[in-house]
Structure formats: structure tokens, C-alpha cells
Amino acid sequence: MNKEATKHSSTRIKLVIALLIVIILAILAAIFIPRYNNYLRNKSAAEGKLALEALRNTVDNYWKTNGSISGISTENAIVEAGIKDKVAAKWQFAIAWKETTLYTTEMVNKLKDVNTNQMVYVSPYKMIMAVATDANKLREGTKIWFEGDTNQFHGYGVDELVEPNWISIFPNP
């Protein structure tokens, strides 16, 4: 009987150890899985912001080189910016161009205010935006954008804004 009691006690100890291991693994999973998912979301947002920056630089360089934005489309700019297909599949890009009259008026007004030999920059676009697709680790529809007039990035991973000021971008829809 002593042998049987020892065997029964040994089985209990093994079950307790197995249960402790499962509990420890569950705690570790509860801690590290959300952190890993957050890391993936932040990585995706950074990837989107880098792609936006490359797109913005490409559009700015095209405009500076050609003196106009005619002849460049969002699709061409994505290719010229060197945005990889893998990244382009995760983000949908859009450029809200300014009307020529608005751009010209802004340029003339800024030049009136310049008293010295300062560089004057007026963006040919109101905004360049990246919207997460369903292939993205971020929730589909999550936005990151660059405002041409303020020269600033906004959206997920940048600040607390979740939507741009649509009225300032499209005042007369």
C-alpha cells in the first residue's frame, strides 16, 4: 500500500507542476501577446509614415523640377517614390491637389509678405494621405496624413487626431 500511496502522490505532484507551468505560460502570453501586437501596429504605422514621406518628397521634387504637377498621378508617384508592393498593399494613398488659382493666390500672398531673400514654399497639394487596407496590421481605415499647408504629419502613431479637417481640405464639396 505504501507503494501505491507514493505513486498516487507522485501523480499529484506532476499534475500540480503541469498546472503551474500552464498558469505561468498563460500569464506570459497575457503580457507579451498584446505587447507584440502593439509592436506590429507601431511598425506598420512607421512604415506608412515612411511611405508617405517618400511620396511627399517625390511629388515635391517633381513639382520643383517641372514647375507644375501636371503629368504626375498618385500611381506614378508611388512607383517613382520606390514604395514596395508589399507596403502599397497595406496602404491606399491619395493626394488632394490644390486648384491652380488657389495655389497661385497663396504664392502671391506669401511673396507680398517677404521682406528679405527668404525661400517661400507653397505646397501644390492640400494633403497626402495613407489609409490602412484590410491587409494592414492596423485596423482597416486607420489614417496617417501629411498637410501641405502646415508641413506636418498627423494621424495614427503621430498625434491624437484620427481624421483630418475635411472642411479645410474640401471647403465646397
Image (tube, grey):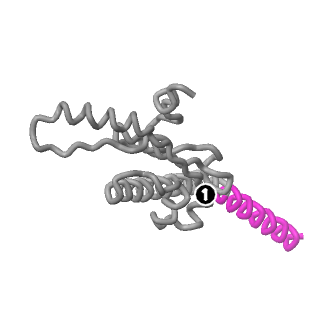
Which residue is situated farthest in the bottom direction here?
A: 3
Query: In which quadrant is the N terminus drawn?
Result: bottom right
The amino acid marked with disc number 1 is Lys
Q: Residue at x 58, y 44 (%)?
A: 142
Q: Nearer the viewer, residue 17 or 70?
A: 70
Q: Residue at x 45, y 52 (%)?
A: 70
Is residue 124 a member of the stretch shown in magenta? Answer: no
Q: Nearer the viewer, residue 62 or 155?
A: 62
Q: Give coordinates of residue 109: x percent, y percent.
A: 26, 31
Q: Which residue is mark 1?
A: 90
Considering the numbered disc 1 on the image, is that residue within a helix, a strand or a loop? helix
Q: Residues within 10 Å of mark 1 (few under 14, many from 20)?
A: many
Give the vertical position of 161 relative to 10 (above or below).
Answer: above
Indicate the quadrant where residue 9 lies.
Answer: bottom right
Q: Residue at x 47, y 44 (%)?
A: 145
Residue 11 lies left or right of residue 62; in this view the side is: right
- Magenta-drawn segment: 1-25
Residue 97 lies left or right of residue 28; in this view the side is: left
Q: Give coordinates of residue 20: x percent, y percent.
A: 69, 58
Labels in figure, total: 1
Q: Give coordinates of residue 38: x percent, y percent.
A: 55, 51
Q: Magenta: predominant secondary structure element?
A: helix
Q: Give coordinates of residue 51: x percent, y percent.
A: 47, 58
Q: Nearer the viewer, residue 109 or 4?
A: 109
Which residue is situated farthest in the left direction here?
A: 116
Give the vertical position of 56 relative to 153 (above or below).
Answer: below
Q: Residue at x 55, y 59 (%)?
A: 75
Indicate the quadrant where residue 81 lies.
Answer: bottom left
Is residue 6 a member of the stretch shown in magenta? Answer: yes
